Amino acid sequence: MVHALNRTRRWLRPDGCLIDLHPAGELAHVEVCTPGGIVRVGEVQDESDAKGPLGRHHAAELALDEAVANHGWIREERATFTFSSQADSPEEIDAHLRRKWRAAHLDVATIDRAHALLRANPGAVVRVIERVVISRLTPRS
Amino acid sequence: MSLRLDPEGHEISSLAAFLPRRANLRVLEIGCGDGRLTRRYAHMVARVLAIDSSRLELDECRQTMPADLAGRIELRESPIETLQIARDDADFDVVLMSWSL
């Protein structure tokens, strides 16, 4: 990862910057937004690799820290934000996860809990919530 | 109704806040995937070279790219490890790594 990150330096202007986005160190969760409030119904089951989502976050943070400590980058700015993926049914969410995430899905219990809330609350939506870290790094001159 | 990704716009507003404050930005995006994010920020910059190692993802990106953005986005199939950029073109204002570390 650090190698890839450092490789980008050759393509940057001297006053250019690198912007990285990666999931923050918490599991993505599933919630249903009802008129009465937001109800958490489960977590995304992510079996992409041995590291798992938290391990991948940790590896990305380590790569950035290593780039700053030993490879001449300055981490100028860092922030987090919430990324939501909304749908009208948990099956839509599940299909999206299976197609676009590496090997993630919703478990049956989460789907059932979401359905119960959606049936009881017309107009409610189900969504996946991820926390994302965004960082801006610049090459040390 | 179909899936809605980041309907609140948190991702694009965060990215906009981190982009350099100058005109005619050139962006190299590493791991653009199906272009979900590329489509959202491309109108803010002058040129994008977006790379991905997956031909399938790039095909989807091409098929879903709005015509008014196509002229400013170049897509290239390549992993970062073997990416070659001519010296004259290697002056990007921003390298964007989106979920690719």
Image: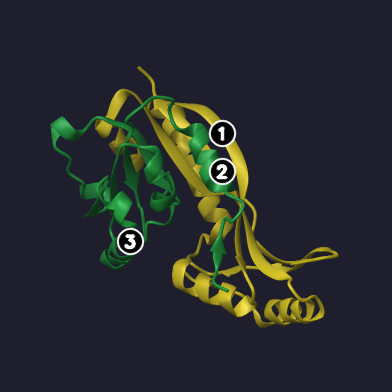
Chain colours: A yellow, B green
- CA–CA distance between discs 1 and 3? 28 Å
Q: Quadrant of the N terminus of chain A?
A: top left
Chain of the residue displaying label 3: B
Q: Amino acid at mark 2?
A: Val
Chain of the residue displaying label 2: A
Mark in front: 1 vs 3:
3
Location of residue B84 by image quarter? top left
Is A29 displayed left or right of B60 in the figure? right
* Tag 1 residue: A78
Viewer can see residue B92 = yes
Q: Secondary structure at mark 3?
A: helix
Identified at 14% across, 31% down, the residue is B88
* Tag 3 residue: B61
Is A92 displayed left or right of A3 in the figure? right
Location of residue A35 by image quarter? bottom right
Q: Amino acid at mark 3?
A: Cys
**Mark positioned earlier in the residue sequence (1 or 2):** 1
- Residue nearest the observer in this picture, B52 or A1: B52
- CA–CA distance between discs 3 and 2? 24 Å
**Whether label 1 touches label 2, CB < 8 Å:** yes
Which numbered tag is attached to residue A133?
A: 2
